[in-house]
Amino acid sequence: MKRMKKLSRMLLKIGACCLFLLLPAIETIAQQVITTNPMNLNYRFYPPEKQDKGREAADPVCEYFKGKYYLFASKSGGYWSSTDLANWTYIPCKTITTIENYAPTILIYNDAVYYMGSGKSPKVFRNENPDADNWVEIDAKFSTQIEESLDDVSFFTDDNGKTYLYWGCSDKKPIRGIRIEPENGFSAVGEPVTLIEHHFEKYGWEAPGDKNQNNKKGYNEGPCMTRYNGKYYLQYAAPGTQWRNYGDGIYTSDKPLGPYVYDETSPFSFKPGGFIGGAGHGHTFKDKYGNHWHVASMTIAVKHMFERRLGLFPVYFSKSGHIYAHTVFTDYPFEVPQKKVDFSNSDFSKNWNLLSYRKPVVASSGLAGCEPEKAVDEMIETFWSSETGNAGEWLQIDLGDPLRINAFQINFADHEFKIRGFQTYFNYQYIVESSNDGKTWTKLIDKADNKEDKPHDFIVLGKPVTVRYLRITNTHEVPGKFSLTGFRVFGKGNGKAPKAVAKLNVLREKDLRRYEFSWDAAEGATGYIIHWGTDKNELRNSTMVMGDTQLEAGYFNRDSKYYFSIDSFNENGITRNKKVYETGMIH
């Protein structure tokens, strides 16, 4: 009996120790911050002069200041703050009189935030507490020293305390820069320096067109400066914000005003594929742990060419000194780490796969050209629309089998909405129900009393559920048609990951900026990832191809040698393919 009691006490101690060891892991899971793209923000409707043009936010800039991140973007009527880069609070702004100017920039200097929008003779505003709308205009002298219009402006302060201004937005003019002195009314020092010219004939991604097919100059714009390990990385966007192939490239130098040399790995921030495309006119910044991020413009361009959203992408620098951004799976759920991490080893994807792609759907009603299947085709440009905006309109998905669900992204289309004007938003109210037989339904998400405007609502379930059928129902009349660009469901499938792609055919065209890719369908695959790079050991650029086995692309450098690989994926996982294909060879 004594031996039994002694053994029991030992087991209790061991159990307590095991529980103690498990607690940190449990705490870490509970504290995970998870997000996806487009960013879950209250995108504003267009002002009155642009009727029926939808919503817009673009040309973002973000910085960390006094415990919070502050995010500004074009045509937003204000800005956002966050403590974790995933959950944002909107701050309407009236004291910045140029808040409606395009392409703003901010500068953290002398314990305050300075704001400036683009344009001729731009104004500068200062705020020591940006949580409050109490910005004060300062006397900015450079606006009288620099005669040209300062479009797509960007501030940068070097490690030695010197501050610089970069700008440029044109299909003719270059990207330029100059040193300024904030302590002296932002007066300019010296003359503007030309830093980046147009070279579309060499760099295919600078040529305009949805496939970079227009053989002319595109828009070079949106500069941003980052310093890392003593090297200056001058970023710029091309070829135009209305295309999915809008991205950010890199020139490097050992001096903030150059001369600069083109980085052959460009564009470094690039996302032409997936649910939503575009990753251009961005801003690279550090979080409070020292990790780098890139916030950039993403495109819809259906109602208007400037119908845009914002995206957040992890950034890292390779051992060879190149800068890269993870983009390809960032419209799937990913973690925002709350500590210092190495993004070169992980994109921090949650590995929750897309379960809704091309699954059978039915709806309460539909319009011609806006059929229910458009809500599950993984294209933000297409959408399902009901016939009315009445409460009771619904869309239903059959996942095929009971599948484990972790998260939803519900993307509203605002079809035929009549809302417009300054500070105009709309809070959708709806419920999501689940079923395993299509007859008996259980409420899974209840937003019938929702008071927040979230047109790309991202919801992580507190506890995963396993169900087959899902139904979203509108519970409050909307000022247009109840419509969805994407009812996206994330979790784990019950089957196996697809087979690997057996053979990738790579053909470089006579125009060396262009490639043609083709491959045989891999068994079980619903999509593919093509990776490339100018170093066979750094295939860090990627694009997603859904439901097809070919790709024509014109966004490569004329004089660069490339290497490629291809992965396959489905709702059960990704199959990596280690085989590397050399540029210009047909295999």
Image (cartoon, grey):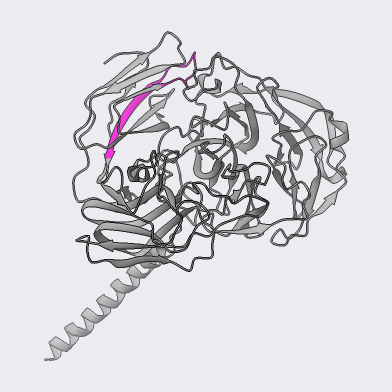
Residue 275, image x, y percentages: 41, 40
Would residue 157 be visible to someone looking at this image? no
Image quadrant for the C terminus?
top left
Whether residue 500 is situated above or below residue 85 in the rendered picture: above
**Rendering quarter of residue 199:** top right
Whether residue 14 is situated above or below residue 194 in the rendered picture: below
Image quadrant for the N terminus?
bottom left
Q: Residue at x 31, y 44 (%)?
A: 357
Q: Which residues are magenta?
A: 553-569
Q: Residue at x 44, y 41 (%)?
A: 380
Q: Nearer the viewer, residue 518 or 110?
A: 518
- The magenta stretch spans residue 513: no
**Rendering quarter of residue 393:** bottom left
Residue 174, image x, y percentages: 69, 22
168 displayed left or right of 290? right
**Rendering quarter of residue 17:** bottom left
Q: Residue at x 40, y 32 (%)?
A: 543
Toward the top, the furthest residue is 510
Residue 491, image x, y percentages: 30, 53
